Amino acid sequence: MIRYGITIFLSAFLLFQIQPMIAKFILPWFGGTAAVWTTCMMFFQITLLLGYLYAHLVRRIFSPQMVWRVHLVILILACAAVLATHAVPPEFLKPTGGENLTAAVVKLLAITVGLPFLVLSSTGPLVQAWHSASHGGQTYRLYAVSNFGSMLALLTYPFFFERVFSLNVQSLIWSVGFILFATLCCWSGLQTASQSKWLQTQHEPDQSKSDEADRVGVGLLIAWIGLAMAPSVMLIATTNLMSQEVASIPFLWILPLTLYLLSLIICFDRPSLYRRAVFTPLLIASTIVSILILHVSNQISLLPQIIGLAIVCFSCSMSCHGELERLKPAPNHLTLFYLMVSLGGALGGIFVVAIAPRIFNDFCEFHIGLFACLFLTAGVKVIEAYHQPKNNTFSAWLSVVGALVAAGCVLSSLIYFIDFGYEKGLLTFERNEYGLVSVREKNGYRIMVNGRTEHGGQFLEGPEKMQPSSYYVQGSGPSIAIQALRSDPKRERKGLNIGVIGLGTGSLVTWGQPPDKFWFYEINPLAEKLARKYFTYLEESKDQSQVILGDGRIQLERQLKESGSLKFDVLFMDAFTSDSIPAHLLTRESFDLYWKHLKPDGILVAHITNRFVDLRPVIHALAVERGHTPILINHIHGDHQTRWVLMTRNADVIESEIVTSVQSTWPSDMEEIFWTDDFASLAQLVDWSIKLDWNEETPQPPANRNRK
């Protein structure tokens, strides 16, 4: 029993260590968007399904002896793949801009870790089948061991491995662990390597003598798939919401997945801990609370949102997995059961990642997942009460009534988010892999909103139409930087070369004048589409502006390699005000790239206004390290405040009256934090305090609104 348990534990540990590790490797390649992690989850669920399918088929088709030999060959191939790459994505797979994010991530993962992950995925059911054939016993306990290994891997990654080891060292440790796992897996199969047929045990009756009661019907298969699919939808949908709120960081990826795995451990190792009287009311209450959070998320801080979403994710997982455990079959159907469970998980991932963004304009999959969990768990109770009317029928029907009430709240909220006719001034609302983008209009002023963050606005008519607005008004970071350069007496009177990471509406061009040249870098094709369709900045400055699709850092690296430095006078980084922070734009390596593209007297400007993350420690440390003076500007406009940092070696700019009259003082107790591509953590900069703000933000002209 020990050898099987150790093998399954190590395989599960490695399986869930590689997920956040490889996702963190490739996150900078795709702009740091939350969709990278959810796409990774979908890929891993599909690969898990393929691993379970492989285990099920070889168990049914081949003898134990042949299974061991086939698996030995696959293990050797997987070890060769690991030794060749050490699970590090090759540079040639880097996107060039404009690719479909989902397809690009899936291709990269398949080439880099596809075969090793497939082998790890098949280990659980295959080794359990070996154990059942040679020893019998409680094979489902090994499933709990597997989930415990998975959960331990997830918990140790953000709190130990990510903090202590660089990414390259992590990949080396994982590679050594995989070789050790392969050795243990071979050892585990030795017990059955000489068997010409699968032995029957008292726990696995001869299938030829099975009666009808032991057969698995279509209804049971559908129940297994549904009860596995619903919590999978909730897992990825909840992760999506959490990651969109702050950043695509391992901590926020791992929390929902840890709770999901914890529910599997509890339900399959200690099924007595799943009590309907506890978890059904918790599911109903947490559903209502989570719906409320969705509607007031702009008014509450991060921590209450995370707690509320985590509780509903756990209650959904416990309720569905608890009912799934009650419906588990005898060990002779073990691999089929795991295959159906993994199929449900994969279908949930495909629905959330590949289908929902193409059919919904909002995160409606969260509502659908909630409704499915309520419907399935209530349905199981109804069917059970019908077939066993003496078994506590009253409590079953009472829970059904509560589930119907909660389902009504979910459907009402879903209709609210789908039908945008209720919202006056909404011109369009679209979604892709990078999130939700809408255009709204009020009082002759039009704005673009990405998620819940304003990304620029424009007056529709009059002399203000091509004047600076929103967060680019007079006194903001861009105005100070550009005016300081234009007033520099040592500077030649010629046009400015201006780079901008983050397009928004393109309103920064209002600070330009011929023959200034603007280079906009935008990762989201939808942002450019809406900026050109609903705003006129790019059209009116078409001879001065150019939009380059793709991650800003990757495009700058490509341009530096192909044509050398672009010699920017000013380079603006306006990609940190959204709820998802692209941390790869704030590392030592990325800043070195910016300095190479800037003229010696140029200015790097960062817009770091954010609801939840204080980026000042990182910005200050990276500027000072290379001898650039960081200038903090806290710009108050109307009821709100924006925060900018100007970084330069230009003494005339630093000492100019334009700058000195508006600069703010850096906090004296601020700790400097250095990030590198190999070592960075946003969790230490997040504001985890609890705050409430019931002043609803609505689209307003710049006189009343100036915060993203």
Image (cartoon, rainbow, N blue to C red):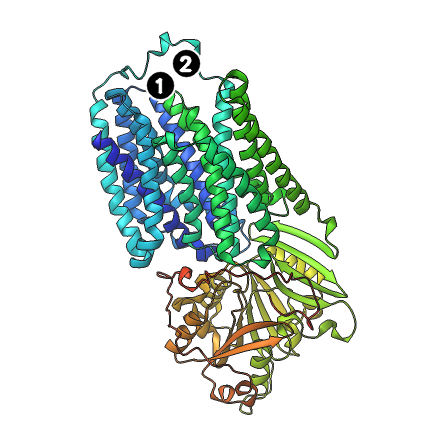
Q: Residue at x 65, y 70 (%)?
A: 470
As drawn, 623 above or below 447: below
Q: Amino acid at mark 1?
A: Asn
**Is the C-beta separation of discs 1 and 2 under 8 Å?**
yes
Q: Residues within 10 Å of mark 2 (few under 14, many from 20)?
A: some
The answer, for residue 34, to whether it is visible in the render is no
- Kindly identify which numbered label has been placed on residue 332: 1
Q: What amino acid is found at the position of numbered circle 2 in the picture? A: Asp
Q: Nearer the viewer, residue 109 or 618?
A: 618
Q: As rendered, which of 63 and 542 lies closer to the eye?
A: 63
Q: Position of residue 99 (x, y in %)?
A: 53, 51
Q: Please provide percent x and percent y for residue 379.
A: 55, 26
- Mark toward the start of the polypeptide (1 vs 2): 2
Q: Is residue 187 above or below residue 551?
A: above
Q: Position of 668 compared to 241: left or right? A: left
- Which residue of the protein is positioned furthest toward the right in this rendering? 462
Q: Quadrant of residue 535?
A: bottom right
Identity of the residue drawn at 45% across and 83% down: 649
Which image quarter holds the C terminus? Answer: bottom right
Q: Is residue 418 left or right of residue 297?
A: right
Cα distance in 3D space between marks 1 and 2: 9 Å
Placement of 514 over or under 328, stated as above or below: below
Q: Position of residue 481 (x, y in %)?
A: 56, 80
Residue 401 located left or right of residue 590: right
The residue labelled by disc 2 is 214
Residue 406 appears in the picture as rendered: yes
